[in-house]
Each structure stands twice: as C-alpha cells, then as structure tokens.
Amino acid sequence: MNKKILEDRILEHEQTGKKRTSQKNKALLQNASTSLNGESRGLKQILPFLGPAFIAAVAYIDPGNYATNISAGSAYGYKLLWVILASNLMAVLIQMMSAKLGIATGRNLPEISRERFSRKASIFLWVQAELVIMATDLAEFIGAALGLYLLFDISMIASALIAAVGSFAILELQRRGVRPLEAIITGMIFIVVIAFGIQVFFAEPEAAPILKGLFTPKFEGVDSILLSAGMLGATVMPHAIYLHSGLTSKRIVGKNEKERKKIFKFEIIDVIIAMVIAGGINASMLIVAAALFNKEGMHVEDLEVAFNQFDSLLGSTAAILFGIGLLSAGLSSSSVGTMTGDIVMQGYINKRIPIYLRRFITMTPPLVIILLGVNPSKALVMSQVILSFGIAFALIPLIIFTSNKKLMGSLVNRKMTTAVAWLIALLIICLNIFLLYQTLFG
C-alpha cells in the first residue's frame, strides 16, 4: 500500500474516533445539564454523574487485596473484618475529598501541586508517584497473568503476554469516550462481585461470627497488627487519590458555585455506591477464606494455593470463579493504573507520552519478574510495601488543598471533615511506617 494512502487512512481513523468520542461526550453533557437544571428526576437525574468513583474503586479490589484479605481470613477467621469496614469508611472520605477537589477547581491534585509547590518539589512528587504506580501495576499485571495461568493452565509468560493484550484493549476504549470505559470497568467490577457472591454462598459462613468480626475491633498479637496494616495499605492507595481528582476535574464542569455543589452531591452518591461494592468484595474475600481455610486450620498466603484449595474444598466451579475474579480485577486495575500515570505526569511536570507507550513501559517490570520466575504472591506482597511509601505524598496535599477556602470556594472542607481527615492520615502513615519496619527489619 502507498505510504501516503496509509497515512491518510490512519488520520481518517483517528478523526472518526475523535468525532465519535466527541458525540458521546456531548450526549453525556446534555444529560448532565438536564439533571442540573432540575428537568429530570430519580435515577435519570443521577445517572450522568455515576462512573468516576467506579473507576477509582477498582484500586480497592486489585490483586493486592486478594493476597491480604485471604491471608487475614485464613489466619484469624472473621476477627479482622472490622479492619475492612474501617478502611472502607476512611476510603469513602478520602475519595470524596479527591472528587471534590476536581469538581471545585477544574484541576487534578498533581496540577494544583505543580502550581503551589516549587519545581524541585513537583519533580520529586512526580518521581515518587511514578514509582508508586509502577508498584501498583506490578501487583495488578501479575494478578491478571496469575488469573490466566490458574484458569487455563498455561505458562506465566504466555499468560503475561495475553494479559498485556487485554489491558491494551481496555485502554483503547478511552478513545471512544468516557462512558464506554466506565461501562467496561463497571462490568468487570460486577464480574468480581458475582464471583465472590457465589463463593460466599458455597462456603456457607455463619452470620454471628461475621457480625462480631465487623463490629468488635481487636487484634491478636503483633502479626495481626502487621496484617491489618497490610490490609489498610492495600485498600487506601495513592493512585486512587490522584485518579479521582483527574476524573472529576473536566468530566462535567459546573458553571458556577451552585452547579458545582450539585455535581458534588451527585458524586457523593457515586462514591458511596462504588465503595460499598468494593467493601463488600473485600469482606467477601475474607469471609470465604475464614469459612473454608481457617475452619480447616490452614493459613493460606499464596494465591495459587488458595485456588487449589478452593478446588479441593468446594469443587472446580469455586476455583474457576476465583480465577475469573482475579483476572477481571487484574485487567481492570492495571488499565486504571496506566490512566493514573498519564494524570500524574501531565499534572506534576506538564508533559505527556502516548498512553500505549506508557502501558508498555509500566508492564516491563512485571514481565521481567515473571521471566525471572519470582513467586507471584511474594511479588504482590512486596508491591504493597512499596505503595506504603507514597500514601503521605498524596493524602497530605489533598487535605491541605481541600481545606483552603480560596481554592475550594463553597466546597471547602468543614472543620470536622478536616480534623477527621488529619486523624486518618496520621493513622495510615503510622501503620504504614510500622508495616515497613516489620517487613524490612522484623
């Protein structure tokens, strides 16, 4: 084919894609305008604003959560369920503040940080954010590959290559507008919901111990504290904070204070629904592990061992559901990690690289780890330790900015919100320091 003809066809394809994306985004904005004007009611009024929290919530059900929740359930039964409940409540507040920052300012957290911090500080924040995202991608990409390996009994290398193709396919949806991407991510979340819902049914857990575990906070020795810190670290993740502010900053822009307040009220509903689902998934993971493995006196830390034990104790259907859930969580969360990388680079240093090139760069470390034959579950645990370095650099600026009246206007944090947010930040940072110390020197 003539080179000129090929270039013309590529340009035509890109323009067609952009036109379709523009049309779909225009429809979204028209529906949102109808809702803001009070011309629609009920679900129809809320629907245009649902989506950003579901994409951010993927970070709360990634393969790192699988490892910590199954380990907690198998080792301590239902006793650490309250940690999941507490972590989820903290995450709701943090994600609300992140969403609010984007709605109030029209900018994401890294962009505001670049404006208000020095050049050197911005570069440092960018570098640490990229390292955190690479660690996140390590867990997510390995999780997706592990899911394929367990389901189809193919090599980890072949599984990793297939997972790479899958994550590229999900990223392609970004070219087709925000709604198709939100739809596929939400669909993959519900695959995980169905998988673990059926597993809970199969496991037949007892209701009384579940309720006691949810509402009776306690530890059983240093190891349970360490595991709780890991569960919290796997739940409240830095890249979800960056991402949510980016998703809400330019999706539906309020023309005035009144509209921005309305948008935030709708986003609160979005956050609550998404985080209740994410919390339910995490709780289900722990409940299934408690009902099966703890009951049999087994402490399961390896996901491959968990898969085999599901097959042994409940049959192949339960094992397949576990593998499908792991694959869905890994693929969706790895694509979301790539989106976050684009946001932090553009925000902190005002640079961009093609998103497919970024996907290729971030998938290289996990591919190398798989080629070297490193145990996938151990790699997942180490990725959670690296993540703990980054939480303060996302959470502290978020609290500072959302407490600034000049920046936030009528959406500024209430004093009680700020006080609770600082307490949460202090707790998370202290637990992560404890986790790091115990992992490295314990």
Image (spheres, rainbow, N blue to C red):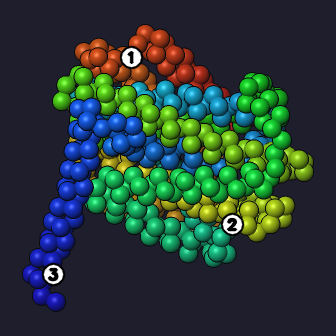
Q: Left of 74 or right of it: where is 156? A: left
Could you tell me which secondary element the residue under label 2 belongs to?
helix
Where the N terminus falls, by quadrant? bottom left
From the image, tell me which residue sits under label 3. 6
Could you say where residue 368 lies in the image, as x and y percent from the top left?
Answer: 53, 64
Write the residue at 56% across / 71% down: 159
> How far separated are the C-alphas under marks 2 and 3?
44 Å
Q: Earlier in the sequence, mark 2 or mark 3?
A: 3
Q: Nearer the viewer, residue 45 or 234?
A: 45
- Indicate which disc residue 233 carries: none
Q: Left of 206 or right of it: where is 421? A: left
Q: Nearer the viewer, residue 440 or 327?
A: 327
| Amino acid at pointer 2 | Ile
The nearer-to-camera label among 1 and 3 is 1
Relative to 293, residue 214 above or below: above
Relative to 361, residue 34 above or below: above
Q: Quadrant of residue 13?
A: bottom left
Determine crowd level at label 3: few under 14, some 14-19, many 20+ residues with C-alpha closer than 10 A.
Answer: few
Relative to 154, residue 244 above or below: above
From the image, tell me which residue sits under label 2. 320
Q: Nearer the viewer, residue 20 or 350?
A: 20
Q: Earlier in the sequence, mark 2 or mark 1?
A: 2
> How far separated are the C-alphas under marks 2 and 1?
45 Å
User: Can residue 166 be spotted in the picture?
Assistant: yes
Could you say where residue 25 lies in the image, as x and y percent from the top left?
Answer: 24, 51
